[in-house]
Image: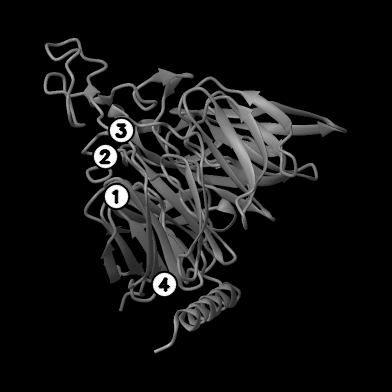
Amino acid sequence: MPGHGERRVVVIVLSMLAATLFAAAPAARSDGWPEWRGPRRAARHAGLDAPAAWPAELTRVWRVEVGAGLSSPVVAGGRVFLLTRAGDEELVRGFDLEDGSLVWRRSYLSRFFANGGAIRPRLYPVSQGKGPFATPVVHGDRLLTLGVDRVLSAFAAADGRPLWRRHYLPVELPAEVKYYCRPCGCDHDGHAFDEPGNCPSCGMGLNPEGLETSARGGGGNYYGAAASPLVSGDLGVVHVGNLTEGLVIAFDHSTGEERWRWSGPTVAYSSPVAATLHGEPQVVTMTRTAVVGLELATGRLLWSFEIENDAHQATPVLKDDLVILSRYRGPTFALRISRQGDSWSAEPAWENAELTQWLTTPVLDGDRLYGFFLSKKGQFATLDAATGETLWAGEGRQGESAAVVLAGDHLLALKDDGSLVVLAKRGAALETVASYAVADSPTWAYPALVGSSVLVKDERFLTLWRIEEEG
């Protein structure tokens, strides 16, 4: 049998070979979905060969039980990567895209006690508000994940080897956590409970006593880290925080070494985007009280625009010098970013109060903005991206949320009720041409589109569905 040294050499050689094969694979494939909302965070998929006749049902290729979490799957090099939770551990796994078989699995301890407002069995029957929420990003041969308690990790995408880890704003947790009903004025008010859940008197979610997720400050509650990490050039960027501060941190994604940090208002739940405005590469992100543009190289604040709201979740959309955003359950609006020498400004360009947003982010298609809006209890609509004018609005009462992806002449919208709706563009209007049941439990995570297949993460399962032409 080979000795210890020989075995170590064999392991190293095999790891290097796997990394080489993985690194070469993305260049040969055009069907990757490497980060939040796909390539460049644009929610656009160029690889769908839309059928002339949409099938009555989609073909289920494989289904894997993966556990809790609202984090979305990402795809690169023929692998699917996913961040989930099981008890007090967060799990990071790589699956084979073709058959769903497990390629590698890693885990780490990350205790987290959810805010009582997030413990809503109707919406999150498995995850119970414990996340994780942020979507990983694959860059080259590395996978970056951000857990619900601000644990940023790097893994070798080929075999899952842990490369480095950082824990931002760690909280010392007690050995035993008690729960209480914060809003209740009934007989149970002030009583302590040993387990999370709902108050037996008023039905509201119980809060963990003395923790950051039980407090309220900075304009709202804190539910955990939700902004997906970003990679731009040789820098990774992550936006984390708590009820008292927000941090945008740039780091070397190879080593985890911090390059710069910007400290600002308390954190929201929107993910940052990379942009080049007026020739300056920058990070655009939303805090709880402002939208900011930070110089990518240094973290210097270039511009800022104050907003009055609480828990923003939609991702900024960039068009020329416009940054298109939404307030939490508020109007869709745009800022025009201007520059004169070293002086920057952000001024309101337009606002559409008819079409309000909550969880979802619209997708840009030329001069049009397609999306799912909270207005009228959920509706699809089209806006003029330059002026904010409503070009078309569909009927209401369509649901609470839908993750919209542009695929050629169609939009695929994964609704929170587990249905995938296919809409055809008819000028500015959208026409529903097909609808499929793709999950038995709520689907809050964005889908990942790969060729003519759709990856769907629900509360328990990860499923690959294939679109095959009828007949």
User: Which quadrant of the view contains residue 172?
Assistant: top left
Give yes or no for contact between labels 3 and 2 (Cβ–Cβ under 8 Å).
yes
Q: Which mark is residue 118?
A: 3
- Whether residues under marks 1 and 2 lie with C-beta atoms below 8 angstroms apart, the answer is yes
Identify the residue under disc 1.
68
How crowded pointer 3 is (Cα within 10 Å; few <14, some 14-19, many 20+) is rated as many
Dots 4 and 1: beta carbons under 8 Å?
A: no
Q: Position of residue 359 (x, y in %)?
A: 42, 38
The relative height of residue 358 versus residue 82 in the rendered view (above or below) is: above
Numbered badge on residue 52: 4
Q: Which amino acid type corresponds to the residue marked 1 in the rendered image? A: Ala
Q: Is residue 210 above or below residue 76?
A: above
Looking at the picture, which amino acid does disc 3 mark? Answer: Ala
Report how many numbered discs are placed on residues in the image. 4
Residue 365 in view, yes or no: no
Mark 4 vs mark 1: give the one in front.
1
User: In the rendered image, which residue does mark 2 sit on?
Assistant: 128
Instruction: Give the foreground label among 2 and 4.
Output: 2
